[in-house]
Amino acid sequence: MALTVALAGNPNVGKSTLFNALTGMDQHTGNWPGKTVGAACGRCSLGPEPVELIDLPGTYSLSARSAEEEAARDAVLFGRQDVTVTVCDASCLQRSLALALRVSEATRRSAVCLNLMDEAGRRGVRVDVSGLHLALGLPLCAVTARKKRGALPLLAMVSKEIPERREPIVLYSPEIEAAVEQLAPALEPLGEMVETRWLALRLLERDDAALASVRSHTGVDPRALPAVRQALEAVTLAPKDAREQIAEAVHRRAEALCDRYVVCRRDRGDERDRRLDRILTGKASLPLMLALLGVVLWLTIVGANRPSEWLASFLFGFQDVLTAIFSSLHAPAWLHGVLVLGLYRVLAWVVSVMLPPMAIFFPLFTLLEDAGLLPRIAFVLDKPLCRCKACGKQALTMCMGFGCNAVGVVGCRIIDSPRERLLAVLTNSLVPCNGRFPTLIALLSMFFVSGGSPGAAALLTALLALSVAATMMMTRLLSATVLKGVPSSFTLELPPYRMPQVGRVIVRSVFDRTLFVLGRAAAVAAPAGALLWVLANVQINGASVLTLCAGALDPAGRLIGLDGVLLLAFILGFPANEIVLPIAVMAYLANGTLGDPGSLEEMRALFLANGWTPVTALCVMTFSMFHWPCSTTLLTIRKETGSLKWTLLAALLPTALGACLCFLISRLALAI
């Protein structure tokens, strides 16, 4: 049987990096708290002996305040791992040690891993590893996970038989210790399933969430045991006093260990971080953040133009080869139409239009993430979000939504308050995901500015700023109506600025994000292309099914500045936003097949021939940003909320906003 090891720890201490270094897996890591919102499992080996690793979500304590912290606590307490390793940040050890002390109380076999030793050295922090090991009485190992230093000694340490801890590491006040001794005999029936000392402390604190978790995992409510009730009645200590004394004792013990075994000298890196924070979190922070986003978008637009043309030329040129193969096989015309003119052409369009922008945007965005800028954005946006009665962590989930709204919805688990988490889930789709960027970039370049000019990036940045403003507006509206409440306070760790691992970031962003999202789009686009060819070529009374559907939707489309073809394209693009523009092009072409996109000028000529104006393009861009989420996102919302009502509301909110904005734009243009 494999040795099972769980990795616990605070957010942003490198658990996922250590997990990747040990298992060779590619779990995504980031330089900001809450990046890991679920547990991951992997395997490695030390000689012939297999080791199974579990990377738990980050938590600051075992007194859970969110769903992710509850998952981490329950895994530490009731998981079947042989050893629980608490990963600590060696450059900021006191807070991490407090969690390690809590974990040692709650588990029979635990160990400590000091990670980020290289960063601690750069920041002038020196840890007496051997002295700390003796003082804790726990197995301890120092590693640098980013460089894979110390990973094998860590495996060797946990693979040995770790004895069960006998003596408590933290001693509390005489009142607390006396109460624990009174409760310990009464808790013996649960001794095989949970540590009685830890459970006695939770009973003294009246930690209802932890006690409910014990009941759900053991089937026994410890408060219902007669002996426990009698022991609690004999305790005169108030739960609030017990809670304060226990927390103070843990932090005092962690502080004493750090004072004795950690030496810090004045660090220039801290001074540099403070100077940067005064700039990036000060009054000029928002303009600087927008300018930085504009630079990223400009590089994306400029860098994607030529590769898109080359890729389109190659992929659409390969169609002639496929046609020749079908001809040599004497395949029926309808089969050639479905597979080549429908399935392959839509697939070629999606790949040629989507791949270059994503291959540039994702690495650039990940570099900013790895450098530690995203938590600063959350800090800056905390005040306006607080005015909307929401949580500043929603800014982090918005940033995740720019990559994929479904990922942003899952990321909302890092928000502690259920009300604020629901606010973030319902409004996440108001920020455009990567699938909408190619449409926005193409229309900007065709109708407003040259694709390579800074103006295109400036306009796209303005649109993204509009989406953030719309998110805040809708959040405020929901807070004042169906989700009333006051904003909760939250603690946000600002990680140090780190030099991004450029090579690793590029490789991981390409494989984890770009190719993953492209594969999802291709999986939807391919069958959609075949279906579209059928709809465009099946005739009813001399008109194709696609034309008839577009005609039926034309009045509604005209009302909001679009037309029936565009509205149908958005409806058929429900599985993935990436295929909206290809559907519109296919419907506009008379022969019912998707043509070679060629240059943007040729595409613009096609749109102009079908009645487009700059106002139409603006309405399409607006509705592309604000309309119902894709099917993947809605299924994710359904899973996260467990409610069909909230899922429907999440689809209705952006659609209503987009329709209203498009209506106003078209009416204003008509009036002018």
Image (cartoon, helix red, strand yellow):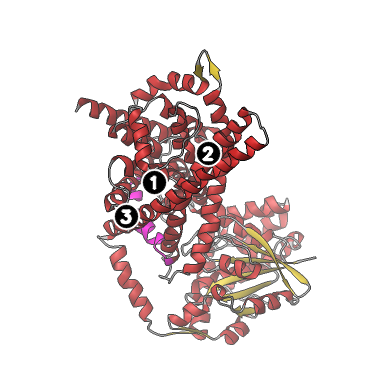
Whether tag 3 and tag 1 are in contact, CB under 8 A, the answer is no
Residue 323 visible here: yes
Using the numbered discs, state the Cα–Cα distance from disc 3 to disc 1 in whole angstroms: 34 Å
Q: Nearer the viewer, residue 357 or 169?
A: 357
Q: Looking at the picture, which amino acid does disc 3 mark? A: Gly
Residue 1 counted in the magenta span? no
Image mark for residue 294:
3
- Lower position in the chain sequence, tag 3 or tag 1: 3
Q: SS class of the residue under badge 3?
A: helix
Q: Residue furthest left?
A: 672
Is the residue marked by circle 3 packed among few (<14), some (14-19), or many (20+) residues within 10 Å? many
**Span highlighted in magenta in the image:** 371-389
Residue placed under numbered mark 2 in the picture:
345
Residue annotated with mark 1: 486
Q: Position of residue 212 (x, y in %)?
A: 63, 51
Above/below status of 546 relative to 366 = above
Q: Nearer the viewer, residue 152 or 505?
A: 505
- Tell me which amino acid carries mark 2: Arg
Q: Residue 56 appears at what percent x and percent y? A: 61, 61
Label 2 vs 3, first from the N-terminus: 3
Q: Secondary structure at mark 2?
A: helix
